[in-house]
Image (cartoon, grey):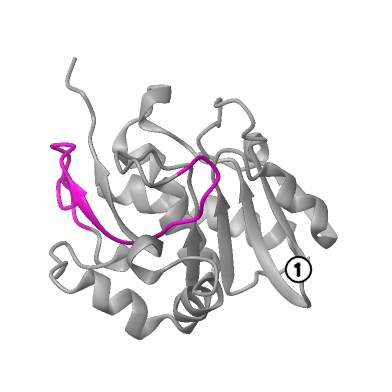
Amino acid sequence: MISRMINDRRESAEFIKSYLRGSVPDTAVVLGSGLGDFVRDMSGAVTLPYVDIPHFPRSSAPSHAGQLVSGSVGGRHILVMSGRFHYYEGLSAEEITYYVTVLKLAGVSKLILTNAAGCINGDFHPGELMLITDHLNLSCISPCRGANEPELGQRFFDMSGLKHFVFRASPIMRQVSWDLCPVMTLSKLRRMLCLFFPLI
């Protein structure tokens, strides 16, 4: 079971590296709902449909193109996932996070996640930006569950200082925060994501 799990991911990663002729950027961006047009601004784009990648899940959500795009934005070479996977599509937790370890094995060391997040704060309006710096996992699904493969990371990891780790370890996130400060207060910019899956 465990060897198959890691072998599938290796095959996916090797296919991506081969398709991109070994030129895999160190930074990847996952586009959430409504952000699919971002790839139009990429120059020198090379597109790889998910359906062509061995063992890769399929994206079925509307507006999620289901393709990996390698190209440049603002003079920086990045890898973009145009479309991601969701629990509500009938996929398991392992399937919707499959791409994370595949990207790591392919050579990606920085991952920027985006999504369309709902909100219970009446001061927010549709289309406003948030920087999610912490989260509550109320899904009853633990990332520590299942067979452990050291190559994919530690089984148990410290989440107590996630918010501070994000801003300390990621100059990009700090810069995003300060760039948005003139139009948004930091108290409004930084928000916590609550992950909740109904059990019915």
Residue labelled with disc 1: 73
Residue 161 image position (x, y, % from top left): 17, 74
**Boundaries of the magenta span:** 125-148
Q: Residue at x 81, y 51 (%)?
A: 40
Relative to 152, 81 lies left or right: right
Q: State the residue in front, 186 or 39.
A: 186
Tell me if residue 23 can be seen.
Answer: no
Q: Nearer the viewer, residue 155 or 114?
A: 114
**Residue 125 x %, y %:** 47, 42
Image quadrant containing the C terminus: top left
* Element on which disc 1 rests: strand
Note whether residue 74 is visible.
Answer: yes
Closer to us: 21 or 142: 142
Residue 77, compared with residue 148, is above or below; it is below
Name which residue lies at 35% across and 45% down.
4
Residue 194 appears left or right of 128: left
Residue 36 coordinates in the image, percent (x, y): 68, 43
